Image (tube, grey):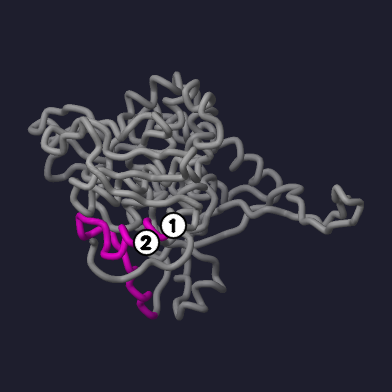
């Protein structure tokens, strides 16, 4: 996206025939029996054999190693697909990573993960199957503290002082009543009706106005030029009007991501760290697009090679970027979405 002159949505030229032969999740050539390989070096994630603090320490230590394995394997798209699962909504980035890592080590599919605890499944009319193996995630331990405000008054706050491990189970390990269908799935190949309208609403909630116009230099047929940009000075998000509704939704999700990732707060910071911030915005938009029904091949617009370039393969840098993107995605997905056709 372009923030007061910041970059517009970029595209890459690819060999169409070669792209069709490669899996959109792992990038490898695919045949009839193709299965994405497990990234080399992925932690064992055998948390069920550990207890208490030992389990928590192992889970925290494995998070950075898992990011390193994902980046080196070139399978970021596959993991973002898991993170976009509607059944993990509102989970932290770390818990989504932990859940996906454990499911993959068990040979499970990462698409459409849906996990809850015993009681939550029972509230949905489903029971955990006998012998089911728990997936372990982290829950914060909070303590109530009293801080002094600027005006001298005392304010009660809850501060995170540690973490504990809690068990959850995937829907594949439960039985009972069917869950209500999600308003947006991954089957349609286009974003669900109401997505563009919902994103426009969220632009207003963020304090910006939405505008469609013909942006100079944009060429939809060639896939070149600026698809949209964000202008913090005038609080505007601008999208080229010549795009399809689905393309507009994708561009708007990217620009809204810049706002919720905090990229509009300091333009000099953006110019210094443009690669990281554009990748964070692309990740966020990808998660939104997938959650709202867009096919992986249509939603993907970032390059693993580009990511590897700016991150220099540093898992800490990449982990921080993923954390920022998932938190921005959670913010964008908050609330209800209107029904109806894209306009």
Q: Which residue is mark 1?
A: 202
Counting from the top left corner in percent of width and height, residue 33 is at 16, 45
* 212, 122: nearer the viewer: 212
Mark 1 to mark 2 CA distance (whole Å):
6 Å
Pick the quarter of the image with the N terminus.
top left
* Disc number for residue 27: none
Regarding mark 2 in the picture, which secondary structure is present there? helix
Residue at point 45%, 54% (across, down): 332
Residues at circles 1 and 2 in contact by the CB criterion of under 8 Å: yes
Q: Quadrant of residue 58?
A: top right
Is residue 190 depicted above or below 243 in this figure?
Answer: below
Counting from the top left corner in percent of width and height, residue 104 is at 39, 46
Spot the residue most to the left.
17
* 312, 330: nearer the viewer: 330
Q: Which residues are magenta?
A: 177-201
Regarding mark 1 in the picture, which secondary structure is present there? helix
């Amino acid at each position: 996206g372009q923030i007061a002159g910041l970059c517009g949505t970029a595209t890459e030229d690819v060999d169409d025939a070669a792209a069709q032969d490669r899996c959109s999740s792992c990038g490898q050539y695919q045949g009839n029996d193709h299965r994405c390989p497990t990234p080399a070096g992925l932690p064992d994630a055998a948390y069920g054999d550990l207890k208490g603090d030992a389990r928590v320490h192992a889970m925290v230590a494995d998070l950075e190693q898992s990011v390193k394995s994902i980046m080196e394997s070139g399978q970021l798209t596959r993991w973002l697909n898991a993170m976009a699962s509607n059944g993990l909504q509102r989970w932290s980035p770390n818990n989504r990573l932990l859940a996906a890592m454990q499911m993959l080590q068990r040979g499970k599919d990462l698409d459409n993960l849906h996990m809850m605890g015993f009681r939550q499944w029972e509230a949905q009319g489903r029971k955990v199957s006998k012998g089911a193996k728990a997936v372990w995630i982290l829950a914060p331990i909070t303590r109530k503290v009293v801080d002094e405000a600027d005006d001298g008054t005392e304010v009660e706050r809850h501060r995170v002082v540690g973490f504990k491990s809690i068990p959850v189970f995937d829907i594949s390990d439960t039985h009972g009543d069917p869950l209500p269908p999600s308003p947006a799935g991954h089957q349609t190949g286009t974003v669900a009706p109401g997505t563009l309208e919902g994103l426009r609403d969220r632009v207003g909630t963020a304090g910006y106005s939405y505008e469609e116009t013909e942006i100079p230099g944009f060429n939809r047929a060639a896939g070149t030029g600026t698809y949209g940009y964000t202008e913090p000075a005038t609080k505007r998000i601008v999208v080229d009007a010549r795009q399809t509704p689905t393309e507009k939704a994708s561009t708007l999700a990217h620009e809204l991501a810049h706002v919720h990732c905090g990229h509009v707060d300091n333009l000099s910071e953006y110019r210094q760290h443009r690669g990281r911030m554009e990748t964070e915005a692309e990740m966020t938009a990808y998660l939104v697009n997938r959650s709202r029904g867009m096919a992986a091949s249509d939603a993907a617009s970032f390059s693993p090679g580009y990511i590897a370039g700016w991150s220099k393969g540093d898992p800490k840098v990449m982990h921080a970027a993923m954390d920022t993107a998932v938190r921005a995605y959670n913010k964008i997905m908050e609330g209800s979405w209107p029904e109806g056709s894209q306009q």
